[in-house]
Image: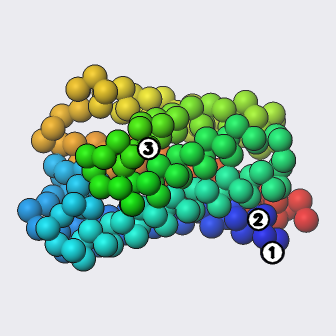
Amino acid sequence: MSLKRNLIKQSVYLPLIYFGTVILAGCFARDYTHWGHHASELAVNANAAAAAIFNTGAALTGVSLILLAAGLLLHFGKQFMLTAVLTAVFGMTFVFGAVFPIGSPLHGLYGVGMCVMLIPFIFLYEQQGKFERPPLRVLSVIAGLLMFLYLWSMVAGLDPVRYRGITQRLFAVVVFGWFAFIAFRISAKMSNAR
């Protein structure tokens, strides 16, 4: 198995890394519910174990995205340049989120992570038929639109406060599910090409 394929394939586990650490951290957290709190609130929780688990998971999530971007660049070169750059930037927002607590503008890297809603559309453009399958197109378009709707609802103040934990988790299912699906499809195609 090549290094390039492994860099891409490891992102299949993104949902497990993110949700596993968020759920585990939530088990230790004080005065916290997954229903009504954003995941980042775990980083400033009174329980040190909850904060450490969450920050570790956020950093690992970011590193996984950066490794995926590196794998795309190493294997495909310029073809996935913009997809890889934006994926790496999105990954860096998680690393920064682990280092800088909520409240700091560096926590979300000044909102640059909102670029995630563009990645599925840019990926579809850059793939140029290489992975042309109707489910890939449909899932990418739906994922991109759902990401946009969630981020827009947050900025517009339409995300219901009482359910913001649930809406954020649903957003994370879409984001990390899409990245995991793409990583799976690309690594499978790389295996078949050998």
Q: Residue at x 89, y 59 (%)?
A: 193
Q: Nearer the viewer, mark 2 or mark 3?
A: 3
Q: Nearer the viewer, mark 3 or mark 1?
A: 3
Image marks 1 and 2: residues in contact by CB distance under 8 Å: yes
User: Which of the image's four quarters has the C terminus?
Assistant: bottom right
* Disc number placed over residue 5 in the picture, else none: 2
Circle 2 SS class: helix
Mark 3 highlights which residue? 109
Viewer-proximal residue among 92 and 160? 92
Looking at the picture, which amino acid does disc 2 mark? Arg
Alpha carbon distance from label 1 to label 2: 7 Å
Give the percent coordinates (x, y) of residue 186.
73, 54
Give the percent coordinates (x, y) of residue 174.
45, 45
Mark 1, residues whose alpha carbon is within 10 Å: few (<14), some, or many (≥20)? few
Circle 1 SS class: loop
Circle 3 SS class: loop
Viewer-proximal residue among 40 and 178? 40
Alpha carbon distance from label 3 to label 1: 35 Å
Q: Earlier in the sequence, mark 2 or mark 3?
A: 2
Alpha carbon distance from label 2 to label 3: 29 Å
Give the percent coordinates (x, y) of residue 148.
44, 29
